[in-house]
Image: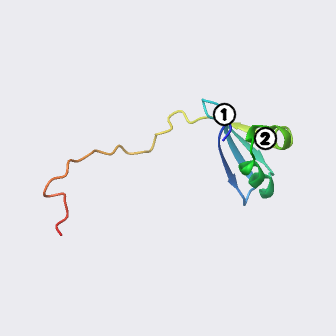
Amino acid sequence: MSTAIRHMHYKSDSQELSVWFGPDFRRYKYFGVPQHLYEAFSEADSQGQFFNRFIKGRFDCIPVAKPANPNKGWQSVRRVSPTSSTIPKQ
């Protein structure tokens, strides 16, 4: 994985490529990216060079804002110490 490109995700049904960049994981969506191009991108020896040569500036893209609270909606989980009442009997 590239030092600039942190993560990528592809939706084949909509040909939508999401790429996360840099230490702050800035996300951009690229539209109309063919699956064969995504596959070559994910397998490239230098994903940064591949991105700059074949994706950057060639597809419509938008920045995706980070959610204000990425954990909103998640319920907290309380750890419970195992006791005789919580351990299933064999």
Labels 2 and 1: the sequence-earlier one:
1
Q: Residue at x 81, y 51 (%)?
A: 32
Q: CA distance from mark 2 to mark 1?
A: 13 Å
Q: Name the image quarter holding residue 64.
A: top right
Dot 1 amino acid type: Thr
Q: Residues within 10 Å of mark 1 (few under 14, many from 20)?
A: few
Q: Give the residue pinned by disc 1.
A: 3
How many tags in the picture? 2
Q: Nearer the viewer, residue 38 or 26?
A: 38
Q: Residue at x 74, y 42 (%)?
A: 47
Q: Residue 71 in the image: x percent, y percent? A: 46, 39
- Is 70 displayed left or right of 80 in the figure? right
Bin the neighbour count of mark 2 within 10 Å (Cα to Cα): few under 14, some 14-19, many 20 and up: some
Amino acid type at image mark 2: Phe
- The answer to whether marks 2 and 1 mark residues whose Cβ atoms lie closer than 8 Å is no
Whole-percent x and y of residue 4? 68, 33
- Tell me the residue that label 2 is attached to: 51
- Find the residue positioned furthest to the bottom: 90
Percent coordinates x, y for residue 60 in the rendering: 82, 42
Which residue ends up furthest to the front in the rendered image?
45
Left or right: 69 as drawn, with respect to 54: left
In the depicted view, which residue is nearer to us: 48 or 75? 48
For residue 24, above or below residue 89: above
Residue at 19% over, 52% down: 82
Task: Single out the mark in the foreground, 2 or 1.
Answer: 1
On-image quarter of the N terminus = top right
| Kind of element beneath mark 1 | loop
Quarter of the image where the C terminus is located: bottom left
Of residue 75 and residue 19, the one placed in the foreground of this image is: 19
Which color scheme is applied?
rainbow
